[in-house]
Amino acid sequence: MGTKSVLHAYAVHEPGGRFEPFDYEVGELTANEVEIDVLYCGICHSDLSMRDNDWQFSSYPLVAGHEVIGKVSAVGSGVTNLSTGTLVGLGWHCGYCGHCHACSSGDQNLCQAATGTIIGHHGGFGDKVRADAASVITIPDGLDPKCAGPLLCGGVTVFNPLVQYDVKPTDKVAVIGIGGLGHLALQFCRAWGCEVTAFTASESKREDAMRFGAHHTLNSRNHDAIEAAAGSFDLILSTVNVALDWNLYLSTLKAKGRLHFVGATLEPLDVNVFQLIGGQRSISGSPVGSPQTIGQMLDFAVRHNIAPQVDFFSMTQINEAFDHLKSGNAKYRIVLSN
Ligand SMILES: [Zn+2]
Ligand SMILES: [Zn+2]
């Protein structure tokens, strides 16, 4: 009893700080926990927001990292679905309460008592990470483990709405923002069978958007072009974290269309309610997905050759990698390798 071990990680000690080597002690695994040897860990924009305490709920020392790909190195006594050596992934959540209405309904990602991998818990920027087995996903054959990390958070975040709202292959879908989330959204929506339009502010991303699967692009700085697209889309996925002229975008929805947020804008939405009432349009948002949806998304990604475009850094270059993310030059996700 009482065996302790030391895990080696990188932590920031204050908002906006640099990551420094950080060792922390852990006790024996609980019955339902597993320990994962981290092979790769993606850097998500949320890691940057958490580093800088943008959302006011970071706790320090903060070991971020919630797009983990690794091998199970130890399992708790009650774990039956995973064994040592299995290639697995871990995303935004590292545990669920397991018995609330959301959990019992298969919506564990909506569990109000879920544990965030980097919220009051040490994440994947290190040699090992721990998580409840229920939140750990087996990586299917055919997925390149080097690039798979960003699918565990970014990927499922843009895939989940397609499942939740029963999006049809005949639907016309638009994606706002061609970045870490948007370049994955374009790939998933295209493979889903939809007619896909990318809203993009930079001409330089136009070709990339087409390469990721957009059939059309619309310059989001061209007011007239957007006005001309009135009544076009069944679904708009917003992946940006800045305020836009939402009423202009609402006008591009068909009747019964939906403007859906997966990017977190901190500014309140300025919305003309008549746009919603007149066309029975909806505004909604969603977080990552349930473990089942993550598994489904990974299978779909294998089948359709969907993969994030990744800039690689070694784990020891974590601060350079964050500088790269913050500069806005990452194309389009970043992965750290051990
Ligand atoms: Zn994330
Ligand atoms: Zn729950």
Image (spheres, rainbow, N blue to C red):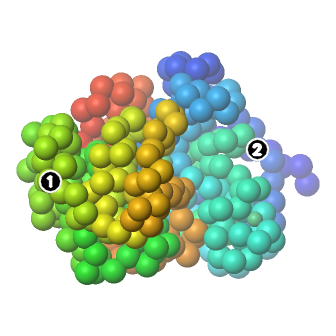
Q: Residue at x 62, y 56 (%)?
A: 93
Near mark 1 (Cα within 10 A), the count class, few <14, some 14-19 or many ≥20, is few
Residue 56 x %, y %:
64, 29
Residue 248 visible in image: yes
Circle 1 is placed at which residue position?
A: 228
Circle 2 is placed at which residue position?
A: 26
Q: Nearer the viewer, residue 162 or 94?
A: 162
Instruction: Examine the rendered structure and indicate whether residue 222 appears above or below residue 258.
Output: above
Where residue 330 sits, quadrant-wise, is top left
Near mark 2 (Cα within 10 A), the count class, few <14, some 14-19 or many ≥20, is few
Q: Nearer the viewer, residue 290 or 61?
A: 290
Q: Residue at x 18, y 57 (%)?
A: 229
Q: Residue at x 52, y 20 (%)?
A: 16
Whole-angstrom CA distance, mark 1 to mark 2, is 59 Å
- Mark 2 belongs to which amino acid? Val
User: Quick check: marks 1 and 2 in contact, CB under 8 Å?
Assistant: no
Report if the beta carbon of the residue with label 1 is closer than 8 angstroms to ligand 1. no
Residue 220 x %, y %:
20, 42
Which element is circle 1 on? Answer: helix
Which element is circle 2 on? Answer: strand
Residue 223 x %, y %:
18, 40
Instruction: Identify the mark nearer the N-term, 1 or 2.
Output: 2
Instruction: Examine the rendered structure and indicate whether residue 87 appears above or below residue 184.
Output: below
In the drawing, does residue 42 fall left or right of residue 234? right
Q: Nearer the viewer, mark 1 or mark 2?
A: 1
Q: Residue at x 19, y 49 (%)?
A: 227
